[in-house]
Image: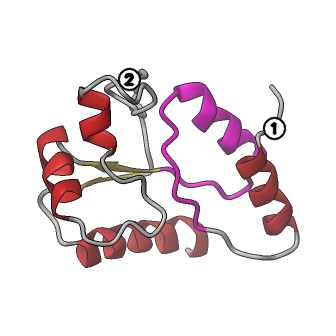
């Protein structure tokens, strides 16, 4: 499998002692397996959010710094076919190192839980 740009860039940065936290939707198992193989000290975090909650959040969002605007509306109207779980398949991870339900926790609590597992996994 050819190394995609995100995985290759991450690997090079890590090899140069730069720590990386990568936010990505690895919607297919093979993408996550490839990243885990290429990136040393890889930790997968599965952040769950029911579709209904994600749609409501996007509708209320005022700032779309790097997030696409109206992605769910476009997916429901068949204008966008690349939304994981709606237009393209989503294969959830079988054994992530940590799973978060973002509909039940505040963003700061989600981040803290991921951080705690990361510290435990890599530093102890």
* Mark 2: secondary structure: loop
Q: Give the image location of residue 25, x and y in percent.
A: 48, 44
Residues at discs 1 and 2 in contact (Cβ within 8 Å): no
Among the two numbered marks 1 and 2 on one chain, the one whose residue lies closer to the N terminus:
1
Magenta-drawn stretch contains 37: yes
Q: Which residues are magenta?
A: 21-44
- Name the residue located 55 percent from the left edge and 55 percent from the top edge: 43
Magenta-drawn stretch contains 34: yes
User: Is residue 60 rendered to the left or right of residue 65?
Assistant: left
Q: Give the image location of residue 3, x and y in percent.
A: 81, 38
Residue named by callout 1 = 3
User: Is residue 26 rendered to the left or right of residue 30?
Assistant: left
Residue named by callout 2 = 87
Position of residue 93 relative to residue 25, above or below, is above
Name the image quarter holding the N terminus.
top right
Discs 1/2, front: 2
Q: How many residues crowd mark 1 within 10 Å: few (<14), some (14–19), many (20+)?
A: few
């Amino acid at each position: 499998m050819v190394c995609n740009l995100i995985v290759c860039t991450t690997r090079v940065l890590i090899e140069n002692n730069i720590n990386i936290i990568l936010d990505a939707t690895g919607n297919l198992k093979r993408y996550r397996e490839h990243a885990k193989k290429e990136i040393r000290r890889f930790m997968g975090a599965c952040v769950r959010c029911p579709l209904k909650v994600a749609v409501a959040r996007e509708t209320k969002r005022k700032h779309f710094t790097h997030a696409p605007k109206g992605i769910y509306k476009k997916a429901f109207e068949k204008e966008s076919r690349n939304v994981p779980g709606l237009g393209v398949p989503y294969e959830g991870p079988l054994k992530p190192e940590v799973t978060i339900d973002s509909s039940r926790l505040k963003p700061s609590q989600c981040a803290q839980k991921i951080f705690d597992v990361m510290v435990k996994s890599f530093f102890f």
